[in-house]
Image: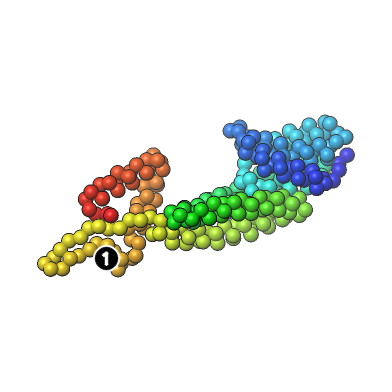
Amino acid sequence: MSNKIDKKTMNSVFKRWLFGVHTCWNYEKMQGLGFCYAMIPALKKIYRNDEEGLKEAVKNNMQFFNTNASTGSAIVGAALALEEQGPQTREAVTAIKTGLMGPLAGVGDTLFVVLPNTVIGSIAAYMALEGQPIGIFLWIAFNLLRLFCMNKFMTLGYEKGSMLVGSIGGLLKNLTEAANILGITVVGALVPSVLNAKFALEWQNGEVLFSLQEIADKVMPGLAPVAIVGFTYWLLGRKKMTSTKAIFVLMGLGIVLYNLKILA
């Protein structure tokens, strides 16, 4: 009844996952339809002589599913390995999807979405301000790496099954913690470089001229940019505050402080 999945079929599944997982997204089952769409080439091969079995397998793979597309490919691979064993593994397929989509979503969103957008985006923006277009190649290089990881995760998930998916989940969590530290360090270092703000306030006491910027530099170089970033972070945490509203607040604050000769 069942047949082994060959390399051509695996490639077809990967392409469908890559291009269809978000294209098929909907509010009812989120990535459920995309997951099923990716699995269909393999299911047709496994159940090529069993039409009823194919129908049941398609229904089983169209359940609710939502995770990060990059790390989620490992779940696709593990599901393929289970499907090869026949209809008796359908509950196991549902269980592995349900159990792993949450943890791998958190890890994948951090490693492949939040941190790259923050770190690579900050570096690319700084290069652009310096007149260097090289930053765009960082995005290209990262996306090529992401495609490689997606394909590798699917292959490993298929070859090693759910045990490997669980183990790489733990490994990726450790990588996430390390990447978080790296991301915070990089963004923190770029704040005074990208954000060009200085204190302009000066006052005179007798013959001595005091400069707020010189005093701030002795306390902490780049204090003005850090203060603006801290204020923005606090602002975005307020109720009903959006990034668009925060931009207008910062624009208005900048105009006021500049005219009061507090910031330059």
- Residue labelled with disc 1: 214
Rendered-image quadrant of the C terminus: bottom left
Say which residue appears at 81% left-offset and 36% top-offset: 44
Say which residue appears at 51% left-offset and 61% top-offset: 182
Task: Classify mark 1: helix, strand or loop.
Answer: helix
The amino acid marked with disc number 1 is Glu
Q: How many marks?
A: 1
- Residue 38 lies, with reference to residue 117, above or below; the image says above
Residue at the far left in the pictured view: 206
Query: Which quadrant of the figure has residue 126?
Result: bottom left
5 or 81: nearer the eye? 5
199 or 65: nearer the eye? 199
The reply to whether residue 263 is in sight is yes
174 or 204: nearer the eye? 204
Say which residue appears at 71% left-offset and 36% top-offset: 37
Which colour assignment does the render follow? Answer: rainbow
Left or right: residue 71 versus residue 235 is right
Say which residue appears at 22% left-offset and 53% top-offset: 261
- Tag 1: Cα neighbours inside 10 Å, few (<14), some, or many (≥20)? some
Left or right: residue 171 versus residue 85 is left
Rendered-image quadrant of the N terminus: top right
Q: Position of residue 113 (x, y in %)?
A: 56, 49
